[in-house]
Amino acid sequence: MSRPSRLQRQVLSLYRELLRAGRGTPGAEARVRAEFRQHASLPRSDVLRIEYLYRRGRRQLQLLRSGHATAMGTFVRPRGPAEEPGDAAAPGTRLGDSGAPKNPCEGTGARETRSDGR
């Protein structure tokens, strides 16, 4: 077996640091494991993507350590096995009781603005 590259060692170190930093935060450990598993199949030759994900992970680690994070969750609702990509509503919208897309700002006191700025 070959020795791990410097980038591989950095990624493994980041993984350990994220797990340690997220110990007291609800959902953090599961989210970290899921993110790393999701990207584990990236080919070693895709260095640009790996470096991008590494930098993104570093930023998330800084946020976790800053103390401002109270929980970690996903921003996008995971698709179920019966849902197709075309069936889901646009990102950021929720479906109301009638099945029609619901405005995410509805009920928050935020006003909609028209395209002419009024």
Image (cartoon, rainbow, N blue to C red):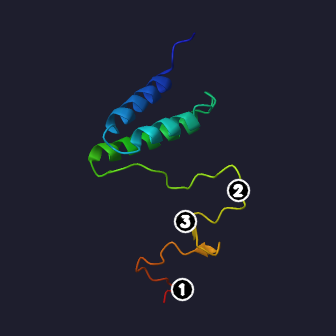
Residue type, numbered disc 1: Arg
- Look at the numbered discs 3 and 1 and tell me whether their residues touch, using CB distance below 8 Å: no
Q: Secondary structure at mark 3?
A: loop
For marks 3 and 1, give the CA distance: 18 Å
Which of the labelled discs sits on residue 92, or is there none? 3
Residue type, numbered disc 2: Pro
Q: Furthest-front residue in view?
A: 97
In the foreground, 97 or 12: 97
Q: Secondary structure at mark 1?
A: loop
Disc 2: CA contacts within 10 A as few (<14), some (14-19) or many (>=20):
few
Q: Earlier in the sequence, mark 2 or mark 3?
A: 2
Q: Secondary structure at mark 2?
A: loop
- Look at the numbered discs 2 and 1 and tell me whether their residues touch, using CB distance below 8 Å: no
Residue at x-position 54% and y-position 86%: 114
On the image, numbered disc 2 is attached to which residue? 85
In the foreground, 34 or 41: 34
Q: Quadrant of residue 28?
A: top left
Q: Percent position (x, y) of residue 67?
A: 27, 48
On the image, numbered disc 1 is attached to which residue? 114
In the foreground, 67 or 52: 67
How many numbered marks have been drawn onto this rendered protein structure?
3
Q: Quadrant of residue 91?
A: bottom right
Q: Nearer the viewer, mark 2 or mark 1?
A: 2
* Residue 113 placement, left or right of 17: right
